[in-house]
Image (cartoon, rainbow, N blue to C red):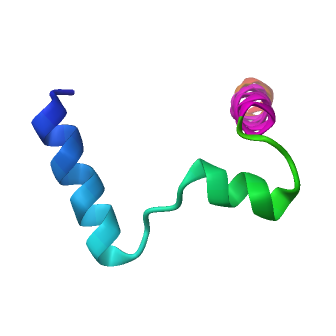
Amino acid sequence: MSGLKRKMQRQIQKNNGELTYKKVIARKMGCSVPELNKRLKRREKNLKEMEDNHNGKE
Protein backbone atom coordinates (compact mmCIF):
# COMPACT_ATOMS: atom_id res chain seq x y z
CA MET A 1 0.00 0.00 0.00
CA SER A 2 1.45 3.33 -0.97
CA GLY A 3 1.92 6.09 1.58
CA LEU A 4 -0.75 8.27 0.01
CA LYS A 5 -3.30 5.45 -0.01
CA ARG A 6 -2.57 4.66 3.66
CA LYS A 7 -2.86 8.36 4.52
CA MET A 8 -6.25 8.58 2.80
CA GLN A 9 -7.44 5.40 4.56
CA ARG A 10 -6.49 6.83 7.96
CA GLN A 11 -8.22 10.12 7.10
CA ILE A 12 -11.43 8.24 6.23
CA GLN A 13 -11.24 6.32 9.51
CA LYS A 14 -10.63 9.53 11.42
CA ASN A 15 -13.64 11.22 9.80
CA ASN A 16 -15.88 8.25 10.61
CA GLY A 17 -14.64 8.09 14.20
CA GLU A 18 -13.30 4.56 13.70
CA LEU A 19 -9.62 5.38 14.21
CA THR A 20 -8.35 4.04 17.51
CA TYR A 21 -4.73 4.45 18.52
CA LYS A 22 -2.96 1.43 20.00
CA LYS A 23 -1.70 3.63 22.84
CA VAL A 24 -5.29 4.40 23.88
CA ILE A 25 -6.40 0.76 23.63
CA ALA A 26 -3.35 -0.40 25.60
CA ARG A 27 -4.03 2.13 28.34
CA LYS A 28 -7.65 0.95 28.63
CA MET A 29 -6.50 -2.68 28.83
CA GLY A 30 -3.83 -1.81 31.37
CA CYS A 31 -0.84 -2.98 29.34
CA SER A 32 1.91 -1.57 27.15
CA VAL A 33 1.75 -1.24 23.37
CA PRO A 34 4.24 -4.11 22.76
CA GLU A 35 2.15 -6.33 25.05
CA LEU A 36 -0.99 -5.29 23.15
CA ASN A 37 0.73 -6.20 19.86
CA LYS A 38 1.52 -9.66 21.25
CA ARG A 39 -2.07 -10.12 22.43
CA LEU A 40 -3.51 -9.04 19.07
CA LYS A 41 -1.14 -11.33 17.17
CA ARG A 42 -2.03 -14.25 19.47
CA ARG A 43 -5.75 -13.47 19.03
CA GLU A 44 -5.42 -13.47 15.23
CA LYS A 45 -3.55 -16.78 15.35
CA ASN A 46 -6.17 -18.38 17.63
CA LEU A 47 -9.07 -17.14 15.51
CA LYS A 48 -7.40 -18.51 12.38
CA GLU A 49 -6.81 -21.89 14.06
CA MET A 50 -10.42 -22.03 15.26
CA GLU A 51 -11.64 -21.22 11.75
CA ASP A 52 -9.40 -23.92 10.25
CA ASN A 53 -10.65 -26.48 12.80
CA HIS A 54 -14.26 -25.53 12.13
CA ASN A 55 -13.76 -25.90 8.37
CA GLY A 56 -11.98 -29.23 8.86
CA LYS A 57 -14.89 -30.79 10.78
CA GLU A 58 -17.52 -30.01 8.16
- Total numbered labels placed on residues in the image: 0
Q: Is residue 25 left or right of residue 22?
A: right
Residue sitting at 61 percent across and 49 percent down? 22
> Would you say 31 lies left or right of 10 here?
right
Q: Is residue 33 above or below residue 27?
A: above
Residue 7 drawn at (x, y percent): 20, 46
- Tell me where residue 38 appears, x and y as whole percent: 77, 28
Question: Is residue 4 shown above or below 17?
Answer: above
- State whether residue 8 is above or below residue 17: above
Residue 53 x/y as whole percent: 79, 27
The region drawn magenta spans 34-51
Q: Residue 50, located in which quarter of the rendered image?
A: top right
Residue at point 27%, 74% (across, down): 15
**Quadrant containing the N terminus in the rendered view:** top left
Q: Please give the name of the residue rendered at 79% of the width and 29% of the height, measured from the top-left corner.
A: 42
The x, y position of residue 32, in whole percent, is 79, 41
Q: Main secondary structure of the magenta part?
A: helix
Locate residue 34: give its quadrant.
top right
Relative to the observer, which residue lies in front, 30 or 55? Answer: 30
Give whichever of 16, 57 is nearer the camera. Answer: 16
- Residue 56 belongs to magenta span: no
Left or right of residue 41, residue 17 in this image = left
